[in-house]
Each structure stands twice: as C-alpha cells, then as structure tokens.
C-alpha cells in the first residue's frame, strides 16, 4: 500500500513534465489513467528501445494504465467523462484554450466532479502575453534568463544538459497537487492549478540573480561564485582529455587541497571576489592537466576536499553507489531508474509501463 493508494489520476499529458509528475504518484500507489490519442504519447517512439519499449517512455510512464481515446468523437468524450467522474486528480498539458474547445476545461470538469484537483501544465501559463507562445524546455529557459548563464568560457550559451524547466514544472505540479489534496480534506472541494514551466523555473535562480533583481547588472558566469568565477567551484581538464571538478568553496576544503599541493600561499586568493581568482584558477588548471582523471581520483581518495570526476552516464550508473542504494532496477526486459522518493520500511517494486490502449 503506497502513500497515495486510493487516489485516482486522469492524465492527458505527454513528453516530460506531466508524465513525470503522474509517474511519481503512480510509484506511491495512485491509480493513474494515461489518456492517449490513438497514435499514442510521442515519447513511445523515442529511441533507444529496450525490451520492446522506449527507455524514455518506460521511465516516465511505469505503473500507469493506458486508454486510447479520440477526444474529437462522442465515444471518446463519453469514456473520458467516465474516468473523470471517479477521479481525484486531472492533469493536462495542452496549449491554453485546447481543453475549453474540447469541453473539458476546469469549469466543465469541476461541475461534474467538484472534488477534483485539476492541474494544467504549460510553458507560460494560461494567461499573459506569452500564454500562447510555443515553447519547449530550452526556449523557456532562454526567456527566463537561465540560458544566459548556461555558457562556456567565451560567454556563448550552449544547449542545456538538463531539461530544468520541464522537470521543475513536474515537481511544482506534483507539490501543488498534493497541497490541494490536503486542502480538500478540510473543504471538501478540489482546486485548479495553473502550473507554468516558466514560473516553476524562476525561483531556481535566487542565489545568482540578486543584482539583476535590484536593478543592477545581470549575472555573468565568469563573475559568479557558483557559475565559474571561483577557483573551488570550477571544472578542470585532465591530462587524458577528461575532466574533474572542485565543488565546494568552504575554506577548509581550499586549505586541505592547497596544503596537499604545497601551495598554501595561494589560499588568500580564495577570499577574493568571484572573477578575481584568475591566478589560482590558472595554477589549478596546470596542476590538473598534469595527471589523468583516474590518477586524480586515486590521489584525492584520502583527502577531505569536495572533488569529483566528471562521469558520463554509463560510468555514473555503473558506480557501486547506484547498486548500494538500489537506484537502477532491471525488470521486464529493461532498466528503470528507481524513484527518488522512497519511505523507510516500504519496499518498492517497479510496475511495467502500459502498451497503448491496453486498459480500454
């Protein structure tokens, strides 16, 4: 029995934010009905495949039920109403206005089921100047300012490695939905959640955006302590063309490393503002370039320094830590990433992702 056993979710979303949100609910026992078009969630067709399913699709849609409906037909709409009438949560990820045109906006749905928590996930929200602007994750990051600090040494923004707007929206939508379900216990009524990827991402810059919020200069990576302007929060190349990072600026870490390198005289540089530590960064670049990545891993093994090698995903998932914590599970002919939310004393076993329309 999971924490959400007894909760029924109707999910019309595809790709990343909504499916991630509802999978986290399914992992905790919620009954999630994935309502797909007759052609299915496009993620089903995204390579690579393992065990006959897309790895992407399996890892965002396990433990759900699939029903394929054409919502432009009377039969499809009737079936959706059947699901809605006994649901606790309704999730959709269409562009603003689509659900109203189909007859399933919050006003219509809550009239049939006043206890339902209705969550709309979109790039920029249901209202406002950008509401109808088409965007996936990177375009949202660009308009939110985040891409400007996702840059290389020359200041040129690069494609982000993490779909932060997508995943931030999924987490925000989940949190809001759970809050609304708790609130429903007091009021007996559901609620409407307008979750925007843009809105969800903005708070994630609070540690770097201070000057800009106050009307000053926008942050630049080269002058930010946590974005590349500090020697002890920095990426360094190694002799074999790989990379390592120093990921902690605390004085004790700096003293431990510079002492071990017999350059404690450089320690005062760590107290300079970000962007003014070039001499120390240059020394560390030369130092790390003198050995291979794995030689540095061995060298740091007995030193109390926030150091890590930069691993690719194959290396990352092969670490003993992954196995020790049960974070990668093989089931049904494929691999699944275990949920980040697990509770003491409760075992979690992965349920399969559904085939298209498998549940009616």
Image: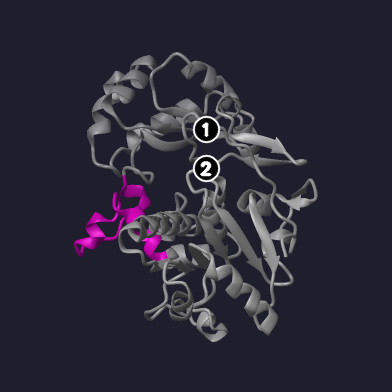
> Do we see residue 145 in this rendering?
no
Query: What segment is highlighted magenta in the picture?
Result: 198-224
Question: How is the protein colored in the picture?
Answer: one colour
Residue 175 as seen in the image, left or right of residue 96? left
Badge 1 element: loop
Please say if the residues under marks 2 and 1 sit with CB atoms less than 8 Å apart: yes
Q: Which residue is drawn at 40% across and 59% down?
A: 146
Rendered position, 121 above or below 108: above
Quadrant where the N terminus is found in the figure: top right
Tell me if residue 214 is in the magenta stretch: yes
Residue 277 as seen in the image, left or right of residue 33? left
Residue at label 1? 346
Residue 229 as seen in the image, left or right of residue 46? left
Report x, y in % for residue 126.
42, 76
Rendered position, 206 above or below 196: above
Report x, y in % for residue 123.
47, 69
Badge 2 element: loop
Residue at label 2? 2
Toward the viewer: 174 or 150?
174
Report x, y in % for residue 187.
31, 63
Q: Residue at x 58, y 39 (%)?
A: 338
Q: How far apart are marks 2 and 1 (CA)?
A: 8 Å
Q: Residues within 10 Å of mark 2 (few under 14, many from 20)?
A: some
């Amino acid at each position: 029995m999971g924490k959400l056993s007894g909760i029924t979710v109707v999910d019309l979303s595809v790709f990343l934010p909504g499916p991630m949100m509802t999978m986290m609910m399914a992992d905790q026992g919620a009954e999630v009905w994935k309502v797909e078009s007759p052609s299915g969630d496009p993620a089903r067709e995204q390579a690579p495949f393992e065990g006959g399913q897309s790895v992407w699709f399996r890892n965002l849609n396990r433990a759900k039920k699939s029903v394929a409906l054409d919502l432009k037909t009377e039969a499809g709409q009737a079936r959706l109403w059947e699901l809605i009438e006994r649901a606790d949560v309704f999730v959709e990820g269409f562009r603003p206005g689509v659900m109203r045109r189909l007859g399933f906006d919050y006003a219509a749905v809550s009239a049939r089921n006043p206890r339902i928590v209705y969550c709309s996930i979109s790039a920029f929200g249901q209202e406002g100047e950008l509401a109808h602007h088409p965007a996936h994750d990177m375009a949202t990051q660009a308009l939110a300012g985040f891409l400007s600090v996702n840059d290389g040494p020359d200041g040129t923004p690069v494609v982000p490695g993490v779909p932060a707007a997508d995943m931030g929206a999924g987490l925000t939508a989940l949190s809001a939905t759970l809050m609304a379900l708790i609130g429903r216990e007091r009021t007996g009524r559901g609620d409407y959640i307008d979750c925007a990827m843009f809105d969800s991402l903005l708070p994630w810059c609070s540690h770097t955006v201070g000057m800009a919020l106050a009307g000053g200069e926008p942050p630049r990576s080269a002058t930010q302590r946590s974005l590349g302007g500090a020697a002890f929060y920095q990426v360094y190349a190694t002799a074999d063309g790989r990379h390592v990072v120093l990921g902690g600026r605390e004085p004790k870490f700096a003293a431990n490393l510079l002492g071990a390198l017999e350059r404690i005289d450089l320690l005062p540089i760590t107290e300079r503002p970000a962007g003014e530590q070039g001499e120390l960064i240059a020394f560390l670049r030369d130092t790390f370039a003198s050995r291979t990545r794995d030689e540095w891993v061995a060298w740091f093994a007995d030193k109390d320094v926030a150091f890590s090698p930069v691993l690719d995903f194959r290396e990352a998932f092969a670490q003993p830590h992954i196995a020790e914590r049960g974070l990668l599970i093989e089931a049904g002919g494929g691999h699944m990433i275990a949920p980040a939310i697990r509770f003491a004393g409760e075992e979690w076993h992965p349920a399969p992702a559904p085939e298209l329309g498998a549940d009616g």
